[in-house]
Image: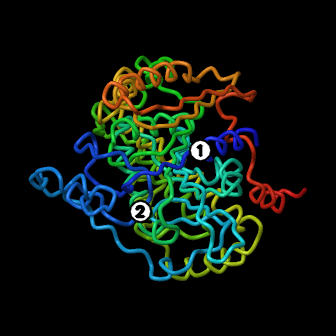
Amino acid sequence: MILAMLVSLLLCCATYNGVSAFIPQHSRRLLHRRNPSYLLSTTSTSPAASTSNPNTTSASSSSTPSPPPPPVTKPQIPPPPPSSQTSIPTPGRWEEIHGNYILRPPTTNSPPTPPRALIHFLGGAFVGAAPDLSYRYLLERLAASGYLIVATPFTLSFDYLATIDAILDKFERIAPSLARQYGPVPVVGVGHSCGALLQLLITSLFPDTPRAANALISYNNKAVGDAVPLFEEVFAPLFVSLEGGSGGNETDGGVSAVEGMELGLEVMRFAARGELPPDTLISSLSQYIQKLPVSPPNLPSTLPDPLRATLNDILTPLKSTPLLSPQITPLLSQSVDVLSQIPSLIHEVASGGARDFTPPPSQVRNAARRAYRARRTLLIKYDNDALDETDEIEGLLKESETVMRMKRPMVTMDLKRVVLEGYGHATPCLAPPLDVVEGLEGVLGE
């Protein structure tokens, strides 16, 4: 609760009265540096279009027009359903839209009062694949305080920039419809652990995705070798073996354990929904089992129609039981999403040769020092957190203000650090979602 109040305190002051608006763009990574803009909107802010802004017309007309910039190819973002443009779904309920989990602030006004800010939330390593469950306690209290929550799940990767590209692709698909519904609102980045690092990189290296403010919780920027002891000596060779020989190729008739993990997780995904796997998955699983040194003979590659019908008749009543209730099913399904990151990481090490994150910690520090642009930043650390590196990033962000003021002397950056009592690095994830607890009580009994 204290954590939510502190983040709310930062966001209360986060509104930026800019003259332009935040617009999703596909070309990022230091390709374009436009005037900073922090508001969610549906209008273009390309250099050519910005001259139509009434606040900038006089300045544009008094100077020689510059040649138009080369066209930037942007992905075609599918329009939202017609209903989303005229009505806002019921607040207080999580929605999954274009790969993002949305939680709207409660309101009794008609028309609804605009949210105080849009919080774009990124969770930590692994648990960031299910932020609506892992961080539900924190995010629901922020939503209750008047903030629109967009929690974007991501798959952990050694390539931070590719991860950010995937995150922003998802966010850009939901941004236009939210802007149509709520109008311009400041966009604030909030991240925990690895998510805090990703928010830092977004604000430093992706100038087309600015933030009015950031809240970085339990920031961590350790190298793989520091975060995982004996990674090079033990885990990397183990991952190559699990992938199936050197370079990920099966040798000497070996079988890839990673392939077996992936098939097993796919079966679990269907089971979590109370469904039978399709025949294509059963066929792949059968072929894999037959390659094992010891395997049962004559495995079927499909389920006979009578057997499938019988099993479906058995499963259908189970969907109305507490075991597959609306509270428990998302927990089971997203647990599979969390586990599904393991095979992909093994593949990156075994086949891709990954041995550290990209960019490595030294380059992340340089980016923060030279290019961090958020005007307001709240750093939150816990007093019992051995993984936290908030002290280091605080010094780097102070240096970034000096660099920024050399370019723009009138710009100031508000940086605040707070130390809280807690249970360590995982504190933001510890409070259980109440509806999940109620669902588990239905299964296990009070």
- Judge from the rendering whether residue 211 lies leftward or rightward of residue 275; answer left or right: left
- The residue lying at 34 percent from left, 57 percent from top is 55
Q: Nearer the viewer, residue 404 or 187?
A: 404
Q: Quadrant of residue 384?
A: top right
Q: Nearer the viewer, residue 26 or 123?
A: 26
User: Residue 248 in the image: x percent, y percent?
Assistant: 30, 37
Residue 13: mark: 1
Mark-to-mark CA distance, 2 and 1? 20 Å
Which badge, 2 or 1, is on the more N-terminal residue? Answer: 1
- State whether residue 243 appears in this view: no
Vertical position of residue 435 compared to residue 253: above or below: below
- The residue lying at 45 percent from left, 48 percent from top is 260
User: Residue 298 in the image: x percent, y percent?
Assistant: 44, 62
- The residue lying at 45 percent from left, 82 percent from top is 82
- Judge from the rendering whether residue 432 lies leftward or rightward of residue 331; answer left or right: right
- Residue pointed to by mark 2: 41
Vertical position of residue 380 compared to residue 176: above or below: above
Q: What residue type is labelled 1?
A: Cys
- Judge from the rendering whether residue 428 lies leftward or rightward of residue 194; answer left or right: right
- The residue lying at 74 percent from left, 57 percent from top is 436
Q: In which quarter of the image is residue 147?
A: bottom right
Crowd class of label 2 (few under 14; some 14 to 19; many from 20; radius 10 Å): many
Residue 333: mark: none
User: Dot 1: what SS?
Assistant: loop
Nearer the viewer's eye, disc 2 or disc 1? 1
Vertical position of residue 219 compared to residue 322: above or below: above
User: Dot 2: what SS?
Assistant: loop
Q: In which quarter of the image is the N terminus?
A: top right
